[in-house]
Image: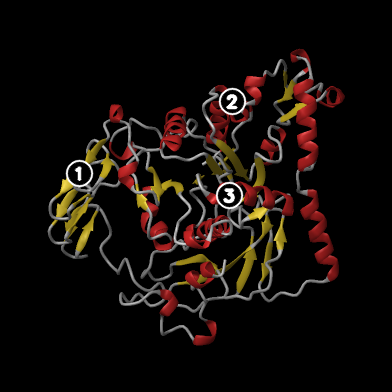
Amino acid sequence: MAAPRAGLGAGAGAAAGVPGRQGSSGVEVVFPSEPAPPAPLCPHGPTLLFVKVNQGKEETRRFYACSACRDRKDCNFFQWEDEKLSGARLAAREAHNRKCQPPLSRTQCAERYLKFIELPLSQRKFCQRCQQLLLPDDWEKHHEHRVVGDISITQLRRPSQLLYPLENKKTNAQYLFADRSCQFLVDLLPTLGFTRVLCVGTPRLHELIRLKASDDKKSNIKSLLLDIDFRYSQFYMEDSFCHYNMFNHHFFDGKAALEVCRTFLQEDKGEGVIMVTDPPFGGLVEPLAVTFKKLIAMWKEGQSEGSSHKELPIFWIFPYFFESRIRQFFPSFCMLDYQVDYDNHALYKHGKTGRKQSPVRIFTNIPPNKIILPSEEGYRFCPLCQRYISLENQHCEHCNSCTSKDGRKWNHCFFCKKCVKPSWIHCSICGHCALPDHSCGGPKDGCFICGELDHKRSTCPKITTSKKVNRSISFHLATC
């Protein structure tokens, strides 16, 4: 979760209303059919197209907004889909976008890094206020700032510990893997036969992979980091870091960075590579799925014709309650029971019990029986499910599955014909299980427009044909 927590929320994000409730409303992302005009640009790259939906009403006017920021105070880009802008406004927008970019180019950052490591230890300084490595010519400008000296090579290899995490909860809540989770992945990946790791929004994993490769002469594993936090440009050469927005597949440094990623994915005809991604939890699954499909397509370009049936191995780290959404776009994915925890998050910690356990899991297209979870943490193998499960997860003979998602023992409901959370009870009024203090009234599923249960909003007959939003995501993904 190390990319800034730049999600899509109330201002530009997932539908916030409850289906079937009168007066509910929300905002949805739209993926138009191809060919579509290019989206306008904001400082974070191509924007996304959204539409506001209201329960009981047809769609309203569609608009473009930032793909990365959910608070308009952080990126106030807004443009109606059918709005025509004057030349002066377009020029002003381009100037603003340029002004918001990092002060140094990717090449300049690499050149400064090479100069920095040549300095004697006493001259290696880092400005904590500006979050910048300082060369001697920079000292005078930062003499009133809090500056740390004697920056060692070891510190340079762990930039996530040198940089302050971005903690603006609305836009930049930057959480970093705890060493437990990071070390688990670093140890696991080579045992699965991977020699290259595409780290999308996982800077701490990238660090540990590189550290292991430099300290262990037998290790041949390599890593490439794609992250929206441009500060990492100071610590890596162009072939190991790309400034990247995972919500719109945008490489800030253009074709040169795109080719770095392409070369990395296609090396050895695409063999031995895995993508590990830890997206912001506030972001929509749809744009992420589109981006990951594009990275998969890039990887497949280097495959031989006989390997076209293969899938790019992926670890997608996300909360367990997004399972159905992820599997909607990646049906081959399964969810592992392993709890991922973070250093600087108050709740996402391993070892807590009940509802306080970390909800973050690993979704993958790798057969789960190949992924051994640590027995010292209580994980055990279920021969019936052919996967490793958490300590309290028990096999249900009625469901024929280990059903727990959150680490607690779930109970089977014979009315619902499935296992449910232990805190839920069956409600005879609603006809399904829910929390004891839930509100009975109105359907919880079905159409967002009319509340009927036999269809979804996109196919509601009450929406005129001319105004239906084309949300055929599968068509869009197929053209990526």
Question: Which of 314/31 is in front?
Answer: 314
- Amino acid type, callout 1: Pro
Q: Is residue 220 left or right of residue 101?
A: left
Residue 265 badge: 3
| Disc 1 and disc 3 in contact, CB within 8 angstroms | no
Q: CA distance from mark 2 to mark 1?
A: 38 Å
Q: CA distance from mark 1 to mark 3?
A: 35 Å
Q: Is residue 270 left or right of residue 118?
A: left
Residue 408 badge: none
Dot 2 corresponds to which residue?
214
Q: Is residue 213 above or below residue 238?
A: above
Dot 1 corresponds to which residue?
383
Please name the residue shown 42% across and 32% down the image: 184
Question: Which of 453/55 is in front?
Answer: 453
- Badge 2: few (under 14), some or many (20 or more) residues near its Cα, within 10 Å? few
Please name the residue shown 34% across and 37% down the image: 357
Identify the secondary structure beneath mark 1: loop
Q: CA distance from mark 3 to mark 2?
A: 21 Å
- Amino acid type, callout 2: Ser
Q: Is residue 442 visible?
A: yes
